[in-house]
Image (spheres, rainbow, N blue to C red):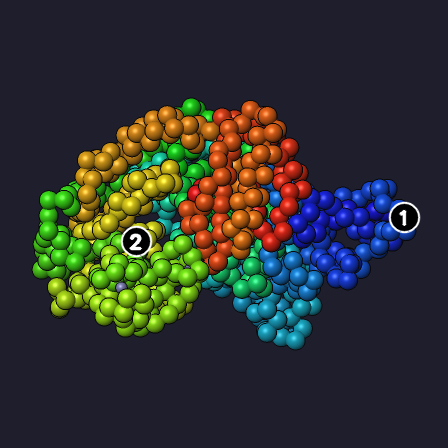
Amino acid sequence: MPILRIALDLPLFTLFDYTVADDVPVVVGQRVIVPFGKRQLLGVVWERGAESSLAAGRIKPVTAVLDDVPPLPAELLNLLRFCSDYYHFPLGQTVLAALPARLRSGQAVVQKTAVFYGLTPLGAGLNLAEFPARKMVQRRILARLATGGAEWSALKKLSATAGGQLKALEKLGYVTRVAGCTPLPPSPACGGGEQNTAHSFASAHALNAEQQTAVDAVLACPRYGCFLLHGITGSGKTEVYMHLMQAALRRGVQVLLLVPEINLTPQLEQYFRRRFAEVELVSLHSGLAEGARAQNWLHAQSGAARIVLGTRLAVFAPLPQLGLILVDEEHDGSFKQQDGLRYSARDVAIFRANWRGIPIVLGSATPSLESWQHASTGRYHLLSLTQRAVAHARLPNIGCIPLNQTPLYEGLSPLLIAALEQRLQRGEQSLLFLNRRGYAPVLMCTECSWVSGCPHCAGKLVLHQKDRRLRCHHCGQQQRVPLVCPSCQHPELRPIGIGTQRLEATLQARFPTARILRVDRDSTRNQGTWHAMRQQIEQGEVDILLGTQMLAKGHDFPNVTLVGVLNPDGGLYSADFRASEKLFAQLAQVAGRAGRADKAGEVLIQTAFPDHPLFRALCAHDYVAWTKVLLAERAQAGFPPFVHQVLLRAEGLQESAVYEFMHAARTAARGLNMSVEVYGVIPAALPKRANHFMAQLLVQCPSRKPLQDFIRAWKPQLDTLPSKGLRYALDIDPLGF
Ligand SMILES: [Zn+2]
Ligand SMILES: [Zn+2]
């Protein structure tokens, strides 16, 4: 009997042997149900063999072989094998984590393949008036298809015998199946019979010279090539993607477009659908219902979907004809998964493109330092867009308001207040950016300096004024605001610092007639709220909008002519060496919201450090100058991109146990005597969260290979250390500390 080696969703670095009867057809990549202890688990056939190292009597037979969906293709299995090796995460867990939840369950998947029909050129040439009248159903079908392609579900409503008659028409060569015709919106092109070659590419925009150069460079690349598309906000990166996608579709290949989580909105999806109305586009993201996600995945696998638009998890979509990968906002932190398989979708995409021998384009206005460094050493090809694509559009004026020379009114400087007033008078919109939600970050006693700390975390309880509650933004703990100080019973408790709710109240008091809208996670909690808010903003029903980073990303507000930035200084001198890189990207993005249409924009940043190189570069719109500063800093400190890192994270309820484990891990690392740099054990940035103590240990090395060798030697030692009640994980190429 053949032996099947199965990948199972278990935290073990091994495959599991099962037998299967000789006459059961089963192939690698197929899903199976197997007994494991008292449970039945779903697994994926990884290998077939004739022998097992287990004694014959101990090998159990598989319970069931699932054939409801096609087996996972070899390319995907290879990609998952690579991820398991590189991120040192168990193979079975890697494989199962990549699958949509519905395929992970044993529940059979009913494939809803929308089958479309259209007229062939022969059918289109028929004169219906001359078509035999007695063939009524055939006539009806032909008449229907003459108005455009139709799904089988629509045709079968024409008659009870539609199925048979349709087959007859197919045989006669009048009608043909049309693969990958998008169900939305009905398009006349579906009737032509040439759907897969004729992309009308709705409302194609002409490219400027820089955009054309970028498109030409990628199109001239017949094999793997990684392109870094560096374009300032508004320079038309999307248009470059569009033209590349169009060219790829013409060549008959599939396209994968990855976007950050927060950017993938139904609007973006609709936008791409409209531009590529003739082909099937599916989206893949965690917000989809289980069934829809499984269907979209299967459409990608069958080749019916020509474009896959998705967030990081879409990098694992099976795409048999994949010919182009685009990663928009490649610097965005959401491409990195922060638990389980801690992969970077951007990095996995690059590996995938390389392995397949196809071009990949990473786009950003503020590329990550890693990508920028690769572009400057020639590993990636740099493509620059330096002009705003919209005619007449100018870059906003960015200036700093030095905080140490100005009195503040509830966090607002007179200059910013005056600028807001001016916009109100002109009937233009303003945007205030404050990346801190709640009313005030902490409540303090004026008498004894008691502060509202979270009982379960190292963080503070944030004051939410509206419902008079204190909330922990880390663990969700909440309580009523105390009437007196819990420590000294003094009646005066003062909110310290400013959150978006407090700013909203301040603005309302200062500008009583202005229409003010706050956008943060609290105000957009209900589904659809953010969508409704965007419409309000677009229709000019808002004068001042204020909010957190939700406002910074991916949304165009053409009437905003003033952007004010409050309190950005925390990112300048953070313990996380990437904080200032992230801050620059964020501020450049939020500044890009100002003056996108025909109106010039102004950006005012309130800071205590107006001479900091970050602000100087930002005001000069000089990303390149900023990267020089950052790269020099990183080179001197010996940080990425000049080294590669692995971070061991551990957490547990008992502080001493966490640190004992970490110190033992460090001793083991040093004992290996390999050419890596082992740092000391330190508390995590938030040392305690939801009663769990968290510590970390960093190991780094100038090149990847010795670091990987080290991890391979170190990991088995970690697994033998006493770790009862602890959770630990290796984070390869960590982004947050
Ligand atoms: Zn007190
Ligand atoms: Zn907490």
Residue 554 visible in rendering? yes
Q: Nearer the viewer, residue 498 or 96?
A: 498
Q: Which residue is drawn at 34% across and 66% down?
A: 470
* Depth check, front residue: 297 or 223: 297
User: Disc number at residue 56?
Assistant: 1
Task: Name the residue type under label 2.
Answer: Asn
Q: Of helix, strand and loop, which one carries label 1?
A: helix
Q: In which quarter of the image is residue 711?
A: top right
Quarter placement of the C terminus:
top left
Cα separation between marks 2 and 1: 62 Å
**In the rendered view, would you say 580 is above or below 658?**
above
Ligand 2 resides in the quarter of the picture at bottom left
**Residue 459 rendering spot, x and y as whole percentages:** 38, 55
Up the image or down, 480 lies above or below 171; here it is below
Q: Residue at x 49, y 60 (%)?
A: 287
Residue 21 relative to residue 83: left or right? right
Relative to residue 66, is residue 127 drawn left or right? left
Question: Which residue matches tag 2?
Answer: 435
Which image quadrant is residue 716 in? top right
Instruction: Identify which residue is drawn at 84% across, 43% down.
Output: 52
* Label 2 CB-ligand 2 distance < 8 A: no
At label 1, which amino acid type do we have? Ala
Apparent side of residue 200 relative to residue 591 in the rendered image (left or right): right
The disc label shown at residue 655, or none: none
At label 1, counting other C-alpha atoms closer than 10 Å, the crowd grade (few under 14, some 14-19, many 20 or more) is few
Q: In terms of depth relative to the viewer, which is nearer, 370 or 45?
A: 370
Q: In this view, does 260 lie above or below 467?
A: above
Earlier residue among tags 2 and 1: 1
Q: Position of residue 172 (x, y in %)?
A: 67, 58
Residue 307 placement (x, y as % from top left): 51, 49
Density class for disc 2 (Cα within 10 Å; few <14, some 14-19, many ≥20) is some
